[in-house]
Image (tube, grey):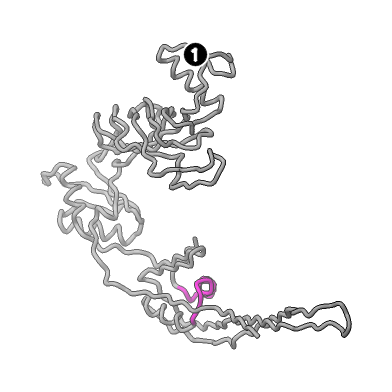
Amino acid sequence: MYRLVIAAAAVALVAVRPAPADVRIKDVTDVSGARSNQLFGFGLVVGLGGTGSRSTFTQDVAVQALQRLGQTTQIFSQQPAESVIRSTSIAAVLVTAEIGPFVRKGGRLDVTVSVIDDSTSLQGGTLIFTPLRGADGNVYALAQGPLSIGGFSVTAGGGAGSGIQKNHLNVGRIPGGAIIEKEAPGELVRDGRATLLLKEPDFNTARLIAKVINERYPNTAQAADPGAVVLCPPADLCKTPTQLIAEVGLLEVRPDTPARVVINERTGTIVAGEHVSIGNAGIAHGNLYIGISFNPLVSQPAPLSAGTTAVVPRTQVSSTEQQARLINVPKATTVAEVSRALNALGVTPRDLISIFQNMKKAGALHAELIIE
């Protein structure tokens, strides 16, 4: 007899509370007005080895591009003749890039090229002259150059057999492939003030940032709201806005963060912040054991019959639930204490998710619960 026992395995939620660390103000804030802008454009990739588009749309786009260069041609569907274009080495693409706030004319940007037609690969292709526009419709950069896709595709049997492919072949990049033709606007100072925007808005963190700045430069900073600290340098502070913002960014502060527990249900990952705490609570948990038994039965034919001896499988399934344990979880003030209390239960990640959710409903978990 063979016996297979399946049991819920125990996992450990390990957490260590490190000493709070000071960080630079520039690492937790952004400067208002110093923001990037998205650029986009529509273009053609040429030079593909038969992996381009066969659609009429792409052929028509190629004809329009050739006509702008002074070439008179048509697509095959309009005039079936030898002087028409019917190439499978072109692809219609969207080109995207990101331009910083203080870049200058003549600088270069990295661009991303993505197929929008039925092309199967951009391998070996070259993007031809493509204007990149901003949300205001103005052209800020011009893109062109050979693509790098970081992958390959090899197919056996003349394209109909098995093959191997590495990475995604319909998206490529051109490092430094766009030249900046127009500078994106950036405004650091408005009405004599500069504003620091907190990446994680918090009342206490904004207050601490203003306090640290004022200790170095008195009467310079004020916490306007949880997400912004306004810098208003006094007249006797002989510093340019760029110099002041640079020096302020190097000052260190100890940010205050809310208590959070983040759970990824797909991977079973659970991360708890250092401020997570729980109140007195009782948790009952019991593991479920499933036993599957295989008892082969030998079947003998009747005497003088034409039958044969056969083995007939007989399966029995039984389940027993372990006696639930009611464990009192004392009031905890650190993640380590929360972890030790839950580890005593020997629970799985899915069980932990359920426990955290029920503790939150019971008011015993003093933290924001985020489930992804």
| Percent x, y of residue 43 | 43, 28
Percent of width and height locating residue 366: 44, 72
Q: From this view, report whether residue 279 is shown above or below residue 223.
A: below
Q: Residues within 10 Å of mark 1 (few under 14, many from 20)?
A: some
Amino acid type at image mark 1: Thr
What's the magenta bit mostly, secondary-structure-wise? helix
Q: Give whichever of 194, 124 is nearer the camera.
A: 124
Q: Residue furthest right?
A: 304
In the picture shown, does residue 309 fall above or below 97?
Answer: below
The residue shown at (58%, 86%) is 324
Tell me residue 214's x, y (percent).
Answer: 19, 56
Q: Is residue 52 left or right of residue 139?
A: right
Left or right of 26 in this view: 351: right
Q: Is residue 369 left or right of residue 236?
A: right
Task: Please say if 265 is above or below 161.
Answer: below
Helix, strand or loop at mark 1: loop
Residue 78 in the image: state x and y as whole percent: 58, 16
Q: Is residue 141 magenta?
A: no
Task: Indicate the quadrant containing the N terminus: top left, top right, bottom left or bottom right.
Answer: bottom right
Q: Residue at x 81, y 78 (%)?
A: 308
Quick check: is 351 in the magenta stretch?
yes
> Compared with residue 79, is residue 123 higher up or lower down, i.e. above or below?
below
Question: Which portion, as a residue range, is magenta?
Answer: 346-365
Give the camera-side residue of 1 and 35. Answer: 1
- At horizontal 21% and vertical 52% (from top left) the residue drawn is 249
Residue, disc 1? 73
Along the line of sight, the residue nearer the viewer: 183 or 25 = 183
